[in-house]
Amino acid sequence: MCNAITKASLEAGMVIDRVYSDGVPVGENGALTVNIQPYTYPDWAVHTVHLKKLRPADFRIPANHCARPKVRVMEYAAGNAKTPVIPVKPRLDGCF
């Protein structure tokens, strides 16, 4: 019995043909075999972030003499609990 599957085992060619959750088969040959109902979050868990209306100026970051700073940007995807942080080099206004 396998309790954990790692990325390395998948990269090594391991094929997963069945998936179980709490002893119930939920996937076979790459396809979901059960209907999953959307989860409705309780009112206390939604609408918890309250921001003023944001303007482009709110996202300006001062840079010193056309330096090429790296900025950490958080990627947002609706319905996804993960928020990956991506380092980017922003466009600098007025620098040549």
Image (spheres, rainbow, N blue to C red):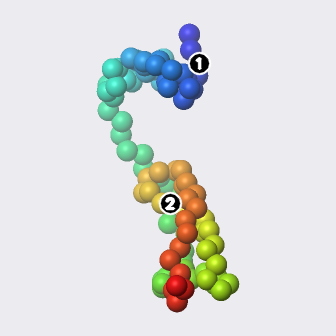
Picture layout, residue 71 above or below residue 67: above
Q: Hey, which residue is sitting farthest right in the picture?
A: 64
**Residue to which mark 2 is pinned:** 75
- Indicate which label's residue lies in the foreground, 2 or 1: 2
Residue toward you, 43 or 36: 36
Dot placed on the residue nearer the N-terminal end, 2 or 1 = 1
Residue toward you, 65 or 26: 65
Q: Hey, which residue is sitting farthest top in the picture?
A: 1
Picture layout, residue 46 above or below residue 61: above
The answer to whether residue 24 shows anywhere in this view is: no
Q: Which mark is residue 3?
A: 1
Q: Hey, which residue is sitting farthest bottom in the picture?
A: 94
Around disc 1, counting alpha carbons within 10 Å, would you say few (fewer than 14), some (14 to 19), or many (20 or more)? few
Q: Residue at x 54, y 55 (%)?
A: 83
Q: Residue at x 47, y 51 (%)?
A: 80
Picture layout, residue 1 above or below residue 4: above
| Screen quadrant of the N terminus | top right
At mark 2, the secondary structure is loop
Q: Amino acid at mark 2?
A: Glu
Residue 53 rendering spot, x and y as whole percentages: 48, 83
Residue 49 rendering spot, x and y as whole percentages: 55, 69
Q: CA distance from mark 2 to mark 1?
A: 31 Å
Q: Residue at x 53, y 73 (%)?
A: 90
Q: Is there CB contact under 8 Å for labels 2 and 1? A: no
Image side of residue 48 versus residue 35, left or right: right
Q: Image quarter for residue 67?
A: bottom right
Q: Which mark is residue 79?
A: none
Q: Amino acid at mark 1?
A: Asn
Residue 78 rendering spot, x and y as whole percentages: 42, 57
Image side of residue 20 versus residue 48, left or right: left
Residue toward you, 38 or 85: 85
